[in-house]
Each structure stands twice: as structure tokens, then as C-alpha cells.
Image (cartoon, rainbow, N blue to C red):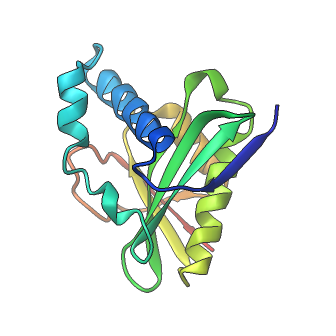
Amino acid sequence: MTWTVAPERFDSPDAALLRRAYYDEVASRYWGRPATAGEIDAGLAGDGAERLTPPTGEFVVGRHGQRPAACAGLLLVDGTTAELTRVFVRPAFRSTGGGGLLLAAAERAARAFGVTRIRLDTRHDLVEARGLYAKHGYVEVPAFNEGPYAEHWFAKEL
């Protein structure tokens, strides 16, 4: 099986399922118990995903073979900086190269927007994500926001 990664609307059926799976995993890990359907719905409501479309951003979906298996969002912050968000690879597809391809696709999109720096925040418990970012050249930087779930901040110059 091979990976393909391409831009896709954040609300396409596959993207919506991936966003839901992403929120389910991060919420469940944070709370230490499975998130309920209502909690997932509440977390997705008004999450700003509509900004992950040109001209304010991009959303990409990764498929392993034909199966939607990963996603990532890119949100423009200003003329030179974008923020990486909603990076997710389904657990069954981790360590197969999809995460690196997602980051590469987001970086290509950022360059197309004229961005020279990508930044992101993540939580302490999302160890796999932190390892992925470090492996692909993202370095820890001082905090650039005070988000309630932000515990580590990374950036990469393009």
C-alpha cells in the first residue's frame, strides 16, 4: 500500500470522519476515558475548521491505499507565518510514513501561500506527535500562545 496526500475540503465525508477521529483521540487521552459522542460533537462545533480553506488555510487528507487514514490543517497567521493544526494519523497507520507526508504537504501549501515559518502547539501526552515534529525538523520554541491545551511549542523555518 502507498500513501497519497492531497488538499480536500475540511467538511468532505472523509475529512469529517478524520476530524472526528482526531478529536475523539485527543479528548479521550486528555480526559483519561473514552470521549462521548456528545463531547466530540461539542468539541467540533465552532472549532474554526472553516478557516482551513484558501485563502486563510488548507486541509489535507492522507490515504493509505484507498482508506482515509490521516489529516492535517494549515492556518495562516500572518503574511509569513502559518500554524499547523489537527495533525492526525489513525493508530493503525502510524509508523508507515504518513505523518511525514502530511507535514510535507502542509509545508508545500505554506510555501504556496508565501509563508516562511510554520509553528504549532501540542500537549505533553501527545508523545507521538512531538516525536514526528522533531524528526521532521521542527524545533521547540518559546510559548507563542496561552491555549488551554498548549504545553509544547514548535516551529520550522521553510
Task: Report if residue 137 is visible in the image.
Answer: no
Q: Residue at the spot x=23%, y=52% of the render? A: 147
Picture quadrant of residue 96: top right
Quarter of the view holding residue 41:
top left
Where does residue 7 sit, x and y in percent of width and height?
A: 58, 59
Viewer-closest of 134 and 1 = 1
Q: Residue furthest right?
A: 1
Residue 42 image point, x, y percent: 17, 36
Q: Residue at x 45, y 71 (%)?
A: 82
Quarter placement of the C terminus: bottom right
Question: Which residue, as the protein is rendered here, is positioned at the far front?
Answer: 13
Q: Is residue 11 above or below residue 27?
A: below
Q: Residue at x 55, y 84 (%)?
A: 114
Relative to 19, say whether 76 is above or below.
Answer: below
Decide if residue 120 is in sight here.
yes
Q: Quadrant of residue 116?
A: bottom right
Of 122 and 112, the residue lying toward us: 112
The residue lying at 36 percent from left, 74 percent from top is 77
Q: Position of residue 11 (x, y in %)?
A: 39, 49
Q: Position of residue 126 (x, y in %)?
A: 44, 33
On the picture, is 75 further left or further right than 109? left
Q: Quadrant of the N terminus?
A: top right
How many numbered marks have been drawn onto this rendered protein structure?
0
Above-or-below relation of 119 to 30: below
Q: Residue furthest top?
A: 33
